[in-house]
Amino acid sequence: MKFSTRARYGMRAMLDIAVNGQGKLVLLKDIAARQDVSKRYLEHMMTLLRDHDLVVAERGASGGYKLAREPSDIRLDEIFEALEGGLEPVECVRDASVCERTDECVVRDLWCEVTDAMKGVLHDKTLEDLMRMHVRKEHG
């Protein structure tokens, strides 16, 4: 299973804002340059993140983006779900009615277990945890 570029780039953009913003506004063009992502693509992701109350946008000459809450209050599953909608790798995990075999299908049970594990990891980590990991990696 692969995560989409939207999820990968969106998570990196949120980390960028957390690391470089520290309560100040961060320009979209600066995020795009640091993350090597097109500004137009980032605009779409920022709209999703803003609609889910994860970032605040301010327009104008000195406008930009900042986190809507403290990094310690933003769980990674919130970011992922804002960008992707859900973690379920197959439709029958999200909606059992799409398949007649859900009651006896052990493969679906496996996908449910995988989904729960991924949700658990992302739910238990915050943007602040990601920032700490970033600092450790950056300073060797």
Image: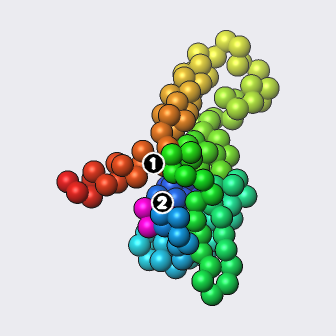
Query: Is residue 16 visible from the viewing direction of this image?
Result: no
Q: Which residue occupies the foreground of this view, 111 or 33?
A: 33
The residue drawn where x is 67% and y is 29% is 93
Residue holding disc 1 = 128
Pointer 1 or 2: first along the chain? 2
For residue 123, side relative to residue 58 (left or right): left
Q: In which quarter of the image is the C terminus?
A: bottom left
The residue drawn where x is 55% and y is 52% is 70
Residue 18 numbered mark, or none: 2
Image coords of residue 40 (percent x, y)? 60, 76
Depicted 63 relative to depicted 85: above or below: below
Q: Which residue occupies the foreground of this view, 65 or 12?
A: 65
Depicted 63 relative to depicted 74: above or below: below
Q: Are marks 1 and 2 in contact (CB under 8 Å)?
A: yes
The residue lying furthest to the front in this view is 23
> Alpha-carbon neighbours of circle 1 within 10 Å: few (<14), some, or many (≥20)?
some
For residue 4, side relative to residue 101 (left or right): left
Q: What residue type is labelled 2?
A: Ala
Q: Does the magenta stretch include residue 36?
A: no
Residue 116 numbered mark, or none: none
Q: Which amino acid does label 1 sit on?
A: Glu
Element carrying mark 1: helix
The residue lying furthest to the bottom in this view is 61
Q: Which residue occupies the foreground of this view, 75 or 24?
A: 24
Q: Is the magenta stretch mostly helix, strand or loop?
A: helix
Image coords of residue 14 (percent x, y)? 52, 59
Image coords of residue 3 (percent x, y)? 52, 48
The residue lying furthest to the top in this view is 104
Which residues make up the magenta segment? Answer: 16-20
